[in-house]
Image (cartoon, rainbow, N blue to C red):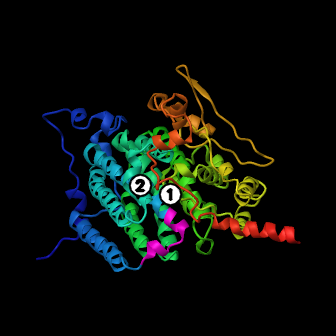
Amino acid sequence: MAVLNRMDWYDLARTTNWTPTYVSEDELFPPMLSGEFGLPLSAWEKYDEPYKQTYPEYVKVQREKDAGAYSVKAALERSRIFENADPGWKSVMKAHYGAIARGEYAAASAEARMMRFSKAPGMRNMATLGCMDEIRHGQMQLYFPHEHVSKDRQMDWAFKAYDTNEWAMIAARHFFDDIMMTRDAISVSIMLTFSFETGFTNMQFLGLAADAAEAGDHTFANLISSIQTDESRHAQIGGPALKVLIENGHKAEAQKRVDIAVWGAWKLFSVLTGPIMDYYTPLEHRKQSFKEFMEEWIVAQFERALTDMGLDLPWYWDIFLKDISQTHHGMHLGSYFWRPTLWWNPAAGVTPDERTWLEEKYPGWNDTWGQCWDVFIDNVVDGNMAMTYPETLPYVCNMCQLPILGTPGKGWNVKDYPLEYNGRLYHFGSEVDRWVFEQDPERYAGHLSIVDRFLAGMIQPMNLEGALAYMNLAPGEMGDDAHNYAWAEVYRALRANRKAG
């Protein structure tokens, strides 16, 4: 029996809108959940998804991808890759699993909102497959690290992280709750799939898969590649929605949602991906710096995507381009200093050879961030380890929930961007974070940062010990130097040689 070409029937088969007779259109698609843009069903029927895939095709491809990823895992289970991997690479895996695995499950709920409440039939079809994608991603990224829990308690944070008050997870939940758990279907498509996934995570998974292969961790490389191929498909959900909004006079609302989500995604990237690429990854495996990666894969491609959609670059684009050379260095220095508050062991990444690489990639690094590391290194070499640990918490931004920082050195200009709202004084790390808050203050005003909670007496005792207990970090889970400070031996030898000379 002849089989029709898919493109001969797909558009007709997925056009599942109908005129409701027992309820009103607003009852079938409540504006609060579907999107309060005032567009009728007929406008959304012009939504044209770039990926046209049927369910049988989807199942066939997913089965093949699962077979590939799980078979590689099974084949390499006795290879002792985890035990023999560089400690910095282990920290990459721990940070990734904790920050991403349960977030994937949450994304399934966001996809389900588009699947049920979008007025665009094509979006509902794509989101149905996207929802199954995210469930698969969550399951795989919990199953793969589970085998290592018996070897390393920090691996348990793949499951545990999102249930804690650890500061990085507060920041992650704050962002993800904003863009995918508390928005209408169309806003989710713009802020999650277009701004976050197309603009950031899709490229992140490509880079991480390449780094894993370079490090010899082919299990992780195949896992990440398997997930990325899904991301590249359902990340396209938001693009056609943007076109519909722009064609119907809603460019300003679409632009604002893009601008909010891109900034929040960037701040999370600066604390997770930036340190991983420029400090944790062993020097011999680094293919490019975080800045180079951002400029090639994020900046260039996202600029092109925005232009293709008929949108403008975010108003803060010049601030963003400057920040990709600076912010992640501060996030790394801060997270390393507050390393007991992490669920992974950060790699310092500041041996003389690594500092030469950092200076080459970021001219002026030694005169700015390097000066701070010089003090840290002197304390480690002198055995003043108490001076290398914090006694309290840094002040954090009331929007991104991450530390407020600035580049040290002669041009040091760390600033607070305050705003008083309903009798409460809020503090922001940049004018962009403050602008995001001002777009919908009622959405954000009730949230307490980790430092707000500390100052309110919610963390007891009011010291590092109390903060660690509040963050649910048990002994054996608290972070410390990935290499047990072996990197400091070269500085100890250099000092001894100077004295001898």
Residue in the picture at 55% in, 19% down? 423
Quadrant housing residue 7: bottom left
Magenta span covers which residues? Answer: 80-91
Q: Answer yes or no: is residue 415 visible.
A: yes
| Vertical side of 98 occupied by 183: above or below | above
Asked if residue 238 shows in the view, the reply is no
Work out which residue is located at the far right of the displayed protein and give it.
Answer: 501
The amino acid sitting under disc 2 is: Trp
Q: Is residue 302 left or right of residue 113?
A: right
Kindly identify which numbered label has been placed on residue 344.
1
Residue 83 colored in magenta in the image: yes
> Where in the figure is residue 282, as x and y percent of width and height?
59, 70
In depth, the one of 115 and 393 nearer the eye is 393
Question: For numbered disc 1, what is the local secondary structure?
Answer: loop
- What x and y, as percent, mark residue 305? 50, 56
Name the residue located 58 percent from the left edge and 58 percent from the top edge: 274
Tell whether label 2 touches label 1 (CB within 8 Å): yes
Q: Residue furthest top?
A: 423
Of marks 1 and 2, which one's residue comes earlier in the chain?
A: 2
Disc 1/disc 2 C-alpha distance (Å): 9 Å
Is 99 magenta? The answer is no
Which residue is located at x 74 percent, y 66 percent?
491
Which residue in the structure is indicated by mark 2?
157
Amino acid residing under circle 1: Trp
Nearest the camera: 279 or 111? 279
